[in-house]
Amino acid sequence: MFQDRRIGLALVLPATLFLLAGFVLPVLVLLSGSLQGPGGWSFDAYVRFFAVPLHQEVFWRTVRLGVLVTLTCAVVGYAAAFAIVNTAPSARGKLIGLLILPLMISPVARTYAWIVILGRTGLVNQALQGLGLADGPVRLLFTETAVFIGLVQLFLPLMVLTLVSALENLPADVMSAARVLGAGWIQTFVRVVLPLTREGLVIGGTLVFTGAVTAYITPAVLGGSRVLMLETLLYQRVSVAGDIVSGSVIAAILVVMSYTTNVLLRRIAAGRGR
Amino acid sequence: MIRLPWMRIGGWATLALVLLFLIGPFAVIIGAALNAGTVPAFPPQGISLRWVVAVFEVQSFRASFFLSVWLAVGSTLAALVLGVPVAYALARYPVPGKEAVRAVVTAPVVVPGIIVGLALLRHAVVPLGVPVMEALFLAHTALLLPYAVRVVAASLENLRPDIEEAAVMLGATRLGAFLRVVLPNIRNGILAAFILGFVTSFNQVPVSLFLTGPGVSTLPIDMLAYMEFTYDPSVAALSALLALMSLAVVLVAERLLGISRFV
Amino acid sequence: MTDGFLALSGLTLAYGGTVAVDRLDLAMAEGELVALLGPSGCGKTTTMRAVAGLLQPRAGTIRLAGRDITHVPANKRGVGLVFQSYALFPHLSVFENVAFGLRLAGTGRDEIGRRVAEVLAMVGLTGFERRLPKELSGGQQQRVALARSVVVRPRLLLLDEPLSNLDARLRLEMRSELRRLQRELGVTMVYVTHDQAEALALADRIVVMREGRIEQEGPPETVYTRPRTAFVARFMGFETCLAVNGGRLVAPDGRSLPLEGAADAPALAWRPHGVVLGRGPHTARVLGRSYLGQSVEYLLETDAGPVKAEAAADAPRFEPGTTVAFDLPLAAAARLESAA
């Protein structure tokens, strides 16, 4: 009954054409703009883009924050996921609900909270001054730390959720087997849990890393123009300076980063590199 | 799994800290929203609803709220209308160039939203005279399509194809079989996709960033703009309202369909 | 009972509020093979996990070779465990699975190679070194699990229903192989099972557990022929257990039969083939009949409730629905100490 290729084609055609015309084509045209020099195709735009020290700084900051946020989410994520998997099933459902909740709340609202917490008169500054650890208000907003905290809060739930399902799929008793064979907790984690949950870790890591390097709201609100990341820089170059060439260069960098992370990490996850 | 006392205590401590970090800020927002003073502060200096009331008086918030709602509903429905047939075809039929179709359909996940907005602005709105509102709608639909396909595909996976064959044997047409037998069974998946799509579109910023203009702005974009120039608790109040709205959505969705299975 | 190679005394284990094992005492000699036998939920697996160090007892002590190991972590006990699910590491080859414990112990490369080859030969898996667990049959996985546990030369080897996931033919084969292995290695073994035939065939001593306590322990023949309680009797194939009260045999629901002769026990039990059919002082209605090959099994409805009886296949048959005479001869009965 399900052999007719024409029906299959007819069903996928509208969406495919829609995306090709309304999405793939404009994006490709935009990206190709970054490869056009005065005399045809060239990497000129990239050379000029990276010649600006600020741009280099922003590029490396974006990569650095992406890596740091991903590592932090991975470490905290494993701890939290272990704790969740160890609770009774009824509590587990509620905990997962609590992790999903922030994902459904407007990132603008989530980020805004950190202004109240980290601001000049915010909670942290009140605490620091109350404990006598600081004389006046400490600058916390518009720092890389603030952006880091905001990004971790934004993306941690994704990591925890993927690791919870990875740990739930761990075959029965393998951890116990490792223990009985003489492995300490750390050895059990490194030799058994980590290799067996690698796929979940990589999927979670991809979500967090691409999410962090392509974040806009968090650096815009918590970093401002002092702590630019690639997306905020792109917006600034295009809408303030009218510099569409730099815009398309950044766009190309972001797409390549996002695409290679997706493809590369997924390949690592699928491979059985022994 | 092995359970020892120290692991239990350590586990709960970790969870408490993580949840404090993830959920705690919303308590701060709600506190700041109820602040009687003129700057957002926590703990609040006196309790008052003046800023909550103020939110409803800001004209642009009201306009962009409704625009965001209609945009979210419209683009989610469009994404489902385009996406459900794709999910169904990929699950049941031989599709020529299956992998290519899959690649195109998941492309919006890989391309950062801000680039979609910029591309449409530069290569559709400006040269072709596509109105900004239509471009915004188009961009949101493209963004939601992959999610619609994925969520619906997940619920199709649990459905055996032989029930359709049974329906056809009993005299139904293919379309009839789909409408009478398949659709009712994947209803929850479609509902889940609708809720996730609505929330994603409603909260979306980067895609919309370049696609706003005179009279066309979404709520989160408006909030960002407002925050840039004004530092009063009305954004806190609005954020608190949005957070409570999401809480309601999550509770209803969890009760209705157990949405945690689809995220 | 605190002496012996392995000695559990007052061992109490609980999950949350429910006590799974209640003040258990058990001693084992070195080189002995003890089977923990009981239905699911009787606490046998829980006991074994505590001995392995995977569960912390609420009370009591575990001593191994004279040393108190109650609070020694699982990875420092030198106790091997073969899991019911095998728990092979799916990301490691057969070789690496078996070598896992040796690597952790810091064994040299050459010795690892030698010892892994040796145990793989012992379980008949030479040549399978590079396979992944998912590329093996159930029986082969079982052998890898076994090899992985014995290669580290544990002082005590625990086996948790190791054969329950195999088909009947393989089960018989592995049963004799386990016995051979135990003799070759001379290792002390605790074997957990719910299958009485397995326990009888393998063990030097059987410990029957019920609701977290030991119901009876002893050599296989003793437990098989002289069960002390109705619980053990039923487990050993005495399908009919009746209390003796005022010269009558009384079923749990109060219905009864007159007892021919005098019994010196509070309860009596019969195996199906101990019930005499076609003659005797009682009558019953035949409810059902199944042909078992060598014999024919009948289900009778008697004045004391249902009774299972077995007759040779060449004996005269009785039709379901008819009435038949039968006897519960005292000579064939097991004398129980308790009717429960």
Image (cartoon, coloured by chain):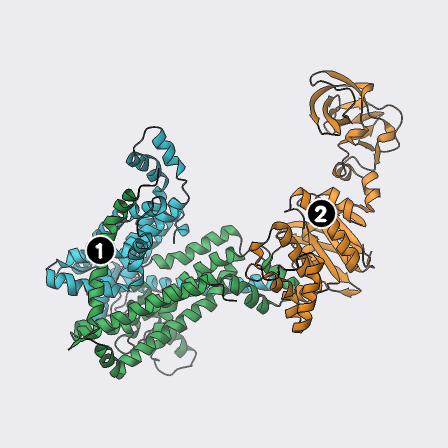
Q: Which quarter shows the N terminus of chain B?
A: bottom right
Circle 1 residues within 10 Å: few <14, some 14–19, many ≥20: many
Q: Position of residue B106 (x, y in %)?
A: 31, 57
Q: How many marks?
A: 2
User: Marks 1 and 2: same chain?
Assistant: no
Q: Judging from the image, what secondary structure is the residue with disc 1 in?
A: helix
Q: Position of residue C220 (x, y in %)?
A: 81, 45
Please state which amino acid type lies under the numbered disc 2.
Answer: Glu
Query: Where residue C173 is drawn, which disc sits there?
Result: 2
Chain B drawn colour: cyan
Where is residue A141 shown, x and y percent of the image? 32, 75
Chain holding disc 1:
B
In the foreground, C122 or C152:
C122
- Name chain A's colour: green
Q: Amino acid at mark 1?
A: Ser
Chain letter, colour orange: C
Q: Quadrant of residue A268?
A: bottom left
Q: Is residue C167 above or below residue C251?
A: below
Q: Chain of mark 2?
A: C
Asked whether, in this view, residue B118 is left or right of residue C147, the answer is left
- Who is closer to the viewer here, C79 or C264? C79
Q: Is residue B185 above or below residue C261?
A: below
CB-based contact (under 8 Å), mark 1 and mark 2:
no
Is residue A78 found left or right of B45 in the rendered image?
Answer: right
Question: The residue tagged with tag 2: helix, strand or loop?
Answer: helix
**Measured from the top left, where is residue C233 in percent x and y?**
78, 37
Which dot marks residue B68?
A: 1
